[in-house]
Image: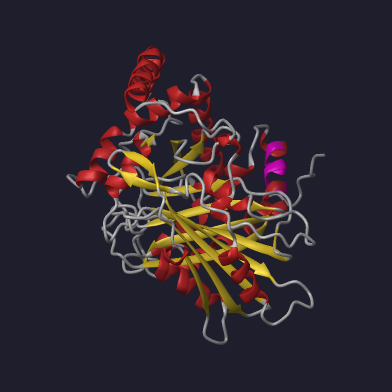
């Protein structure tokens, strides 16, 4: 039995019919060359026939304020096999994911589902998996599913994703009572309180720093409206080298270190600026993005280990170089602050700074007030090509959450040599959100043109 963490409780509290709190991933596979026509059917049968039982966190069911072990696993409650109607385009696949991501998970059972989807054009099939955000965050979920795959196309071994044991469970058998857990948590809070208090005070007294982003400066926008239960999911892949080259050239040209994440935020900023301009809805003040950062330790894949920073997206600036510089400076300001704290202190600092925003999200007492305009999350992914039963993982797209006042979410992950982008939005609140995919490409091209004459440093 494991106690729910503070972040886990928030995700469970926020959930409603129109506000599901699960995250997911869409994994697109290419069939092996010469594969039999029933390859996917055989794959499904191997998964169903597996005698491997679900492990943490997939075997956990809610029990009050704790996760308890579920001893009544029924694969039919969690695993589905479907075929798309012809012609089985990616468009139909994304529609299916949009519909499934709109549906709540049953809290009487472990909070996850896995779907195998065949009949996709280009000799492909897909796996869509969703897990409640209280179970794991994006980084943890990515690692959990990744371990079920192989780095060899010749490996036909099939182990269900929910049966892959984390390296953090090698010390199994040690049980800590609820009372001990409680007092251990209290002791940790007392120990880290002084440094957290100091950083909160510093943040309050230095709010005039132009690079500091507070929870009070996000402008009103059409992104911050109540949502319905209906979702639209859009996804696309981009060549990772293009963004890395831009980061290297800007570092050379401007004399400041620009990271891949800075470029990611810049292209999202430019795309969102163009999208809102097309809707005649661009705020005069810059949009603010909440950017999750992972505090996860190696081998620990369950629960949530994330904190948040706020990034000035500088959407009020028309010049791309001015915009990306402002973004970089605001992110660096937060990085400098986090570098002075331990992971535990960062979590508490984040909780204090975002406490009013969190209370507003839970109660809805001030629906027109928001601490940020959208979430942009960049999750590191696998660097090697992966395979499932001999099928090549061609693409993987993260699927995240939206909620009242936060009608869209852009989540990105790296895979091998690509940047994989998943955009989720309320279908009824935001029109043509899929147009952001083309606008992201346009922003990459703009940055490439601006840096075309800058030599690429080794």
Rendered residue at 28%/61% (across/down): 18
Would you say residue 246 sits in the magenta stretch? yes
Decide: is 274 above or below 255: below
Specify start and end residues of the magenta stretch as a single range: 245-251
> In this rendering, does residue 320 appear at all?
no
Q: Is residue 244 left or right of residue 366?
A: right
Work out which residue is located at the far bottom of the displayed protein and give it. Answer: 86
Rendered location of residue 436, percent (x, y): 50, 63
Rendered residue at 40%/34% (across/down): 213
Rendered location of residue 203, percent (x, y): 38, 23
Rendered residue at 64%/38% (across/down): 258
Rendered location of residue 82, percent (x, y): 51, 76
Q: Main secondary structure of the magenta part?
A: helix
Q: How many callouts does the rendering have? A: 0
Comparing 62 with 446, the one in front is 62
Comparing 122 with 238, the one in front is 122
Q: Is residue 329 left or right of residue 362?
A: right
Would you say residue 359 sits in the magenta stretch? no
């Amino acid at each position: 039995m494991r106690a729910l963490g503070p972040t886990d409780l928030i995700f469970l509290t926020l959930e409603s019919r129109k506000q599901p709190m699960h995250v997911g991933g869409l994994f697109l596979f290419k069939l092996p060359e010469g594969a039999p026509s029933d390859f996917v059917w055989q794959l499904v049968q191997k998964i169903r026939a597996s005698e491997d039982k679900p492990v943490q966190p997939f075997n956990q069911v809610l029990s009050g304020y704790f996760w308890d072990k579920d001893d009544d696993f029924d694969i039919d409650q969690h695993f589905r096999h479907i075929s798309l109607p012809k012609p089985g385009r990616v468009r139909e696949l994304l529609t299916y994911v949009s519909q499934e991501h709109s549906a709540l998970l049953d809290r009487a059972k472990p909070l996850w589902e896995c779907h195998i989807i065949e009949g996709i054009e280009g000799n492909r099939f897909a796996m869509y998996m969703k897990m409640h955000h209280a179970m794991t965050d994006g980084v943890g979920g990515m690692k959990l599913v990744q371990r079920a795959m192989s780095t060899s196309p010749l490996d036909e071994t099939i182990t269900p994703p929910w049966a892959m044991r984390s390296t953090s469970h090698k010390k199994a058998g040690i049980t800590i009572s609820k009372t001990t857990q409680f007092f251990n948590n209290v002791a940790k809070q007392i120990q880290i309180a002084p440094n957290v208090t100091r950083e909160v005070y510093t943040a309050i007294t230095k709010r005039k720093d132009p690079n500091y982003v507070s929870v009070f400066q996000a402008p009103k926008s059409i992104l911050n409206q109540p949502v319905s239960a209906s979702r639209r999911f859009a996804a696309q892949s981009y060549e990772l080298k293009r963004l890395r080259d831009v980061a290297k050239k800007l570092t050379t040209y401007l004399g400041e270190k620009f990271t891949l994440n800075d470029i990611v935020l810049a292209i999202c900023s430019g795309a969102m600026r163009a999208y809102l301009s097309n809707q005649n809805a661009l705020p005069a003040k810059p949009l603010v993005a909440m950017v999750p950062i992972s505090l996860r330790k190696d081998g620990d894949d369950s629960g949530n280990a994330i904190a948040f920073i706020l990034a000035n997206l500088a959407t009020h600036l028309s010049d791309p170089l001015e915009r990306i510089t402002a973004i970089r400076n605001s992110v660096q300001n937060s990085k400098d602050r986090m570098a002075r704290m331990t992971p535990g202190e960062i979590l508490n600092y984040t909780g204090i700074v975002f406490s009013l925003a969190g209370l507003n999200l839970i109660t809805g007492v001030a629906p027109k007030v928001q601490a940020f305009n959208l979430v942009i999350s960049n999750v590191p992914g696998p660097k090697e090509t992966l395979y499932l039963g001999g099928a090549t993982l061609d693409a993987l797209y993260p699927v995240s959450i939206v909620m009242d006042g936060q009608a869209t979410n852009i989540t990105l992950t790296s895979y091998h040599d690509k940047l994989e982008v998943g955009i989720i939005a309320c279908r009824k609140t935001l029109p043509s959100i899929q147009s952001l995919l083309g606008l992201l490409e346009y922003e990459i091209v703009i940055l490439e043109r601006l840096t075309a004459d800058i030599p690429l440093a080794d």
